[in-house]
Amino acid sequence: MSTQRSLTADLAALAVLAAGALLASPAAAAAAKGDVAARVGDQTISFEQVDAKAKQTPASLQVYQQMYEVRKAALEDLVAEQLLEQEAKKRGVSKEALLEQELTSKIAVVGDADVERFYNENRARMGGKSLDEMKDPIRQYLAAQNQAQARLAMVERLSATTKVEVVLDAPRVAIAVKEGEPTKGPAAAPVTVVEYSEFQCPFCSRVGPTVKQVMETYGDKVRLVFRDYPLPFHDHARPASEAAQCAHSQGKFWEYHDKLFANQQALDTDNLKKYAAELGLDTAEFNRCFDEGRFKSVVDGNQAGGEALGVQGTPAFFINGRFLSGAVPLEAFQEIIDDELKRQGD
């Protein structure tokens, strides 16, 4: 956990986690037991049926993702507690004594220089308070951070020597890749990333280098699929999507894709045609394709498919069916991809 996070952010995160756990736990516990959610005459409706139906509702996938994150965090805490309890039992001491031996007594004391450095790096978040006013809260915060990091490192060491099997799965949807879609990477890749995007969206442009990093980092372990999702308030987004499909029909989707993002402020019809010429496409065929709206139905289908999955904005990603929204950093992709590869033994 980075010490760059503010005290307020950490407290807010704890509040959200606690509230989410209270909301998610009863239904989750009932569903795990296969309990009945309702009775209609002599028929019953289970929580499993309720969840299956709810997941068919657009936008509910985001809610399920949030619930999963809460349950995942709670499960990680419970696993850590079990590992520490088992290690303490092996050594014939209490868990508290174990933590004192391995953590508290070995953690470096937070010095004045550490406090001052944190204050200066986060001055804008201090609400106008002086270093003297914030010295004690910062010292306590940094000490807690050091304790948490040392505890996490210890738990990771214990988990490396103890079999830990986690069966909690993330919410995911089944997404079939259609023949002829714009893709990168082998069809047999263990991880498929389906990206819903459009060419006028600034956030889609911003995440582009990150997606490129993903492909470079994982090589043939990841396949990328691009699907159009032109937003209605971007007037050039739909024509650009149709133009990119025309370029795809000549085998140059990704070159055209990159050209559009590199010229995001110039996506009018004349420029869309000019870019095709600059990339060496058959311009007469490209212009006919574009002018006839030959791929309008493809773009419509991509957009409708995204809406059915609950996509509400761009960029939106589905990593082996697991939802990831927005121009997120590389670490967000890595967390899911690494987990998917681990699940498959790669």
Image (cartoon, rainbow, N blue to C red):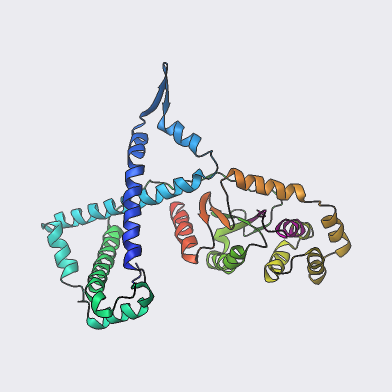
What number of labels is visible? 0
The answer to whether any part of residue 178 appears in the image is no
At x 72%, y 57%, the residue is 241
Single out the residue that lies furthest toward the front: 128
| Left or right of residue 226, residue 108 in this image | left
Q: Nearer the viewer, residue 187 or 328?
A: 328
| Residue in the image at 51% along x and 63% along y | 328
Residue 268 image offset from top left, x and y in percent: 77, 64
Q: Where 201 sits versus 19, above or below?
A: below
Quarter of the N terminus within the rendering: bottom left
Up-down: is 345 above or below 59? below
Residue 115 is inside the magenta segment? no
In-front residue for pair 115/103: 115
Asked where in the image residue 290 lies, by quadrant, the reply is bottom right
Nearer the observer, 80 or 200: 200
78 horizontally vs 312: left or right:
left
Q: Residue furthest top?
A: 42
Left or right: 60, with 103 as reference point: right
Q: Residue at x 33, y 38 (%)?
A: 26
Q: Is residue 277 above or below residue 339?
A: below
Image: magenta residue range:
226-244
Q: Is residue 53 left or right of residue 205?
A: left
